[in-house]
Image (cartoon, rainbow, N blue to C red):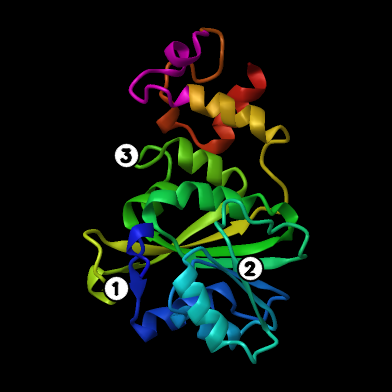
Amino acid sequence: MGRPLGQHFLFQRSILERIAHAACPTPPPLCIEIGPGPGALTELLLERAPHLLAVELDPALAANLRQKHAADPRFELLEANVLDAGLSGRGPAVVCGNIPYYITSPIVEKALSLGPDLIRAVFLIQKEVADRLAARPGSRDYGYLTVATQALCTVEKLFVVKPSSFRPPPKVDSAVVRLTPRPAPLVPDYPAFLRFASACFRQKRKTLRNNLNRANIPYAAQRAEQLSIEQLIEVFAAV
């Protein structure tokens, strides 16, 4: 089960406990678990949250979860594709999950779309993507995804998880990341900034002058990957 969706299920309890603690160090009003699979993490999250909403697409896995937690009033199951699920309007929530690699970016965007209701998000994802989310200016991993995410939240790469901790084992290392929303976005017009950032990183080896086709702007001779988010916002304001 789960393989058609590209899932690799984490079974090592010590790592599951670390993820649950990172997501819910204190009891949140609501915890939303994305892709609970067989429910190993679900049980630990239920110990820490008074209300758990599990979003599972696989019918067989959903049926198993429904049966296992039928008598628990804290447990709620939504059998749906998380990208189509209505998660807003439920109040403050923590989002957590072991995320299929091929839809990591859309799920991160889905979590961030909760806006001020998002307390934090903790995801187990491919290490390569975690490196990009948490990258610093000047590193090879720093790019559009970094800027789009860090404009809204701080990103911490907490720890690496080896393939042997999963069934079946993936071919790459994984990592746990924690996203904590900023008190206020760094830029007021976030959609416009995303379009700007996309243009800046269109060809990473080119300077801002060439990518934006503008000469009279701050940092025109530098590449986007060399600039901090604050510096990119300065350029955005100038254009």
Q: Nearer the viewer, residue 101 or 23?
A: 101
Q: Which tag, 2 or 1, sits closer to the chain's start?
A: 2
Q: Residue at x 68, y 36 (%)?
A: 187
- Measure the C-alpha gap from mark 3 to mark 2: 30 Å
Q: Which tag, 3 or 2, sits closer to the chain's start?
A: 2
Q: Is residue 203 above or below residue 118?
A: above
Residue 52 place in picture, x, y as percent: 64, 77
Q: Say which amino acid is labelled 2.
A: Val
Q: Nearer the viewer, mark 3 or mark 2?
A: 2
Q: Is residue 9 above or below residue 174?
A: below
Q: Nearer the viewer, mark 3 or mark 1?
A: 1
Q: Which tag, 3 or 1, sits closer to the chain's start?
A: 3
Q: Nearer the viewer, residue 93 or 153?
A: 93
Residue 140, which numbered label? 3
Q: Is residue 208 magenta?
A: yes
Q: Residue at x 25, y 63 (%)?
A: 170
Q: Residue at x 41, y 32 (%)?
A: 225
The N terminus - image quarter = bottom left
State the extent of the magenta-drawn residues as a range: 200-214
- Measure the C-alpha gap from mark 3 to mark 1: 28 Å
- Is label 3 in contact with label 1 (beta carbons under 8 Å)? no
Q: Main secondary structure of the magenta part?
A: loop
Q: Is residue 114 magenta?
A: no
Q: Secondary structure at mark 2?
A: strand
Residue 28 place in picture, x, y as percent: 69, 76
Residue 25 place in picture, x, y as percent: 59, 79
Read off the residue under disc 2.
94
